[in-house]
Every structure is written in C-alpha cells, then in structure tokens.
Amino acid sequence: MYINLFYDRSGQVAWNILKAAICILLLCCSSFSLAQATTFYVSAANGKDTNTGGQSLPFKTIQRAIDALTPGDDVLIGAGLYAESPQLRNMSGTAANYIEIAAQNGANVSIEALNDPEDPDAAFLIEDSNFIRLKGIRINGSRRHGIGVFDSNHIKLLNNVTYNTGKSGIRARYVNDILLDGNDVSRAVQREIQESVSLSNVDGFVISNNYVHDRPRDDSLQQEGGVGRGGEGIDVKDGSRNGKIHDNQVEGIEGKFGIYVDAYDVDSYDIEIFNNVVTGCGCGFAFSTENGTSTSGYLRQVKMYNNISYGNRCGIYFGNHGGDASRPDQVRRVEDIAIVNNTIYGNGIGVGGGGIDIGNPHLVGLTIRNNLIFENQGGQIRLTGGLTAVPPRTVIESNLVRGNTGSNPAGNNLQGNPGVQNASGGDFRLTTGSAAIDAGQLTGTPAVDQRGIERPQGAGIDIGAFEFESNATTPVDNISPNPPTDLIFY
Ligand SMILES: [Ca+2]
Ligand SMILES: [Ca+2]
C-alpha cells in the first residue's frame, strides 16, 4: 500500500515507506494533516505570472502554474487562447491524488503552438512524470505532436481535443498504464510520420470513446517523413501490450488503416478490440509486425469483437507488411487472433478490397466466427498476397456471408439475407427475418453485443455485432461527432 502511494521511478522505496509512516503518525496525532494539495488558477483574460495563482489572483500562463506544482496539486484553466507549449517534467502526483490539469468548468481552453520551436516534441508535453490527469484541453495547432506523453506512468487523458498537428494528435511512448478516453483527434499527421493516436512501448492501455477523424491524405504536406508514410487512425505498436481499444469511432482517415496493431520489432500481446466503428478509412482494422524477424516482433493474443467496419478500402487486413519473399529473415509473426461477432460491410467499393483479407504467410492461429460479412467488393473472406491456403490452425465457421464469394477460402459459413436496418446509413441492427438471427454459435461469443444487450436473446446467438431484439429499441452505440469549429489551418 505504501509503495503504491509513494512509489517513484527512482525506486527509493525504503525512504518512501518511512515518509508514509511519518505521514500516518502525524495523522494519528491529529495535529497535522497530509500536506494540503493546492489548486492553481490560470486565466488568459486577467492573469499575471507575478500573481500567486490563487483563484482571485490567477497566473497568466499554464506553464507558470506547472512550475508552481508540488506533488498532488492541481491546475484549473480559464477560457481563452494560450499561445504556449506547456511542459510538465519530473513532477508526479500519487495514486490517491493525481496532479490534474483541467479546463475550469468546461471552459474553452485552446492552446496554439504553431509558431513554437520544434523542441519539445509536443504542444503539451508530459515527460518523466507519474499520476497525471489532463482534461478538457484543446490543442488548436502544433508543428509537432498535440499531446505527448513520454517515459511517464499512470496517465489519464480525458476529453481533450487535438486539431491540426504536424505529427500525432496524441502520442505516448514508454508508458505504463495510460487511459485515453473521450478525446477528439482530427487533422493529425500533417507534416510527418506517426499516426493520429500513436502508442509505442506502452504496457497497460485503454483507448476508449475517442473520435478520431478527418485526416485527409495530402502527401504534399509531409515534409520529412516521406510521401505516404504514417497517418493511420489509432495505432498501438512497437511492443504495446495488455490493452483495450473500445467504443471508438474512426472516420475519414483517407487511405490509411483506421485501427492498426503493429508489433513492429517488439513483442506485442494481449489486446482486445471491441465496440469500435470504423468507416471511410484505408482498411478498417489491420494487424502486422512491420519490422519483424523470426526472433523479434511477435504479435499474439488479439481478440476483436462487436466491431463495425464499413465503407473502407477493406474491412480487416493481415498483410505481409514490407515483407520481401527473397528475404527469409523477414518474418511477420502474427498468432492467435480471434475475430468474433463483428459486422463487416461494403468495403472495397471501387478499389476491390475484401471483407477480411488474409495475406500474411506467417500468420498462425486465426479464428473467424459469427461475423456478418456482406457485399464487400473483392470477396467476403479471401486470401491475398499470393497465399494459396489458409494459415495453420485457422477456424472459419458460422459467419453469414453474402456477395462476391468467388475467392473465399473454405469455411463452414452460411449464406442468406443479412436483414439489417440500413446498411448504407451505418445501422446494422438486425430486422425480423434476418438469416443472422439465432444462427451463430456460443463458443467464444462475447457476453453482450455492441450496445451491451445480453447474448443470447431468443433461441440462440446472432451473427454480427448486434443481437436481435424483437422490439428493437436500443439504438446503435455510435459516438455523436462533435468536431471543433473556428480553427485555423496551415
Ligand atoms: Ca490533485
Ligand atoms: Ca438471438
């Protein structure tokens, strides 16, 4: 307990236990309490950096408040435009008392850092710091990342907005335990490589309820990364592990994967992807180890369920990314991937992509079950990249497929009328008479559907992301897009 309360990265555990004991002793004597956390106030409108930072004497800049912090203190920021790049370094809260930096009462707090130097690497930087919560902040422009979290642990980024960033909207690397919830990220990666939301070497992550959208593919804007590199929607990569990606909406990431898991050259594993909606992207979901060999870069144990992928260049993609058949050292190991109860519709229109494209010769252990896969142009489940047989330990069963099935690998699937409410409008709830109703199987099925409706309803498990309700009153659990307005462009 004491270690949890006071642990810091320098590992001075004994000293911290002593500090904890002293604090508890002081509490018992009732003469003192634990050090009072201070809240510092910031106001662009009437603050001064020579003020004390109290509510009636706020600071002018966010950086001035950060410089005043001691562990557990908070910062509340008033409405306004802040032309600065705040940096929080070597300052931690505790598990019981995070340092919170937040917009005050939902104020419109905008940081614009377009003209700032390229170092530091983010408009809002959190580095070598633990137990930090950043809430309700808008980054209106940055030459580099919007929010950068580096070498820090126990971080929560809640309800922030990033817009018009040269690199990622949100970038985290070498982090243990991070939550990204309710953020809005758009027009990211306008200058360089990396991705709209980009995590690498992160152990323990939750990426939930975010809206990641509108990244036009304009390669002429990319000055340093080379044409066409980077720019995906949500990318967890490079050894990221033990995480969940759920209830996000990813939309309009032109020509690039919506949600991408890429071990790159470090092992990545134990990742669940559920309840996401991806549309208008390159492929909706993709899995790879872009720089893997037989001994490094190994993606394994990924489950994806209750997701919707529609109107993308392909639905779900397993590629041999960067692999060269003449280079036996290039081995893109991907193993034990379960794709269960997803809805995959209308991908590949005009470009020929499929519902699920399997094109990685090093893929092993693939389960595709209870998915509703229909009207994807190039085929519903298909082999690509020269593959002539399904990967070892592949199970394809109880999917309902309709549309071009010419290239589908063998599987115990059904054909029939999907019977969804309004496919082109993105409403994939089932209607009476759908062949998907009660046609799935129980094995490996998630306990609830995309909206939280318990499975099964009626006589059995339904195929796809939605369990049919006879009264069909529960709406699709989409995020309501709320894009930022009146912002500047490059
Ligand atoms: Ca606090
Ligand atoms: Ca049912």
Image (tube, rainbow, N blue to C red):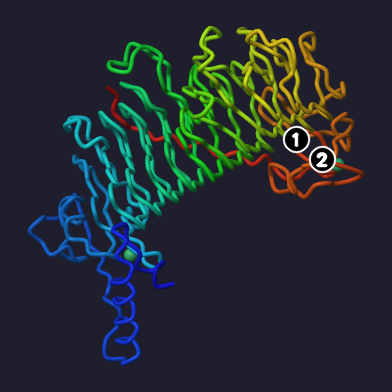
Q: What residue type is labelled 2?
A: Phe
Quarter of the N terminus within the rendering: bottom left
Mark 2 near ligand 2 (CB under 8 Å)?
A: yes
User: Measuring 22% from the left and 60% from the top, which residue is drawn there?
Assistant: 41
> Is 13 rendered above or below residue 304?
below
Disc assigned to residue 257: none
Residue to which mark 2 is pinned: 468
**Contact (CB < 8 A) between labels 1 and 2?**
yes
Q: Give percent across and percent down for residue 153.
A: 38, 52
> Is 411 rendered above or below residue 28?
above
Residue to which mark 1 is pinned: 429
Q: Which of 154 and 394 is in front in this view?
A: 394
Image check: 37 left or right of 417?
A: left
Quadrant observed for ligand 1 in the rendered image: bottom left
Image check: 340 left or right of 174?
A: right
User: Measuring 28% from the left and 42% from the top, which residue is drawn there?
Assistant: 110
Q: Which amino acid does label 1 sit on?
A: Arg
Query: How many residues crowd mark 2 within 10 Å: few (<14), some (14–19), many (20+)?
Result: many
* Residue found farthest to the right: 459
Residue 81 falls in which quadrant of the image?
A: top left
> Is 189 rendered above or below residue 466?
above
Q: Is mark 2 on a helix, strand or loop?
A: loop
Quarter of the C terminus within the rendering: top left
Residue 216 falls in which quadrant of the image?
A: top left
User: Measuring 27% from the left and 86% from the top, which residue is drawn there?
Assistant: 32
Q: Give percent across and percent down for residue 228.
A: 41, 14
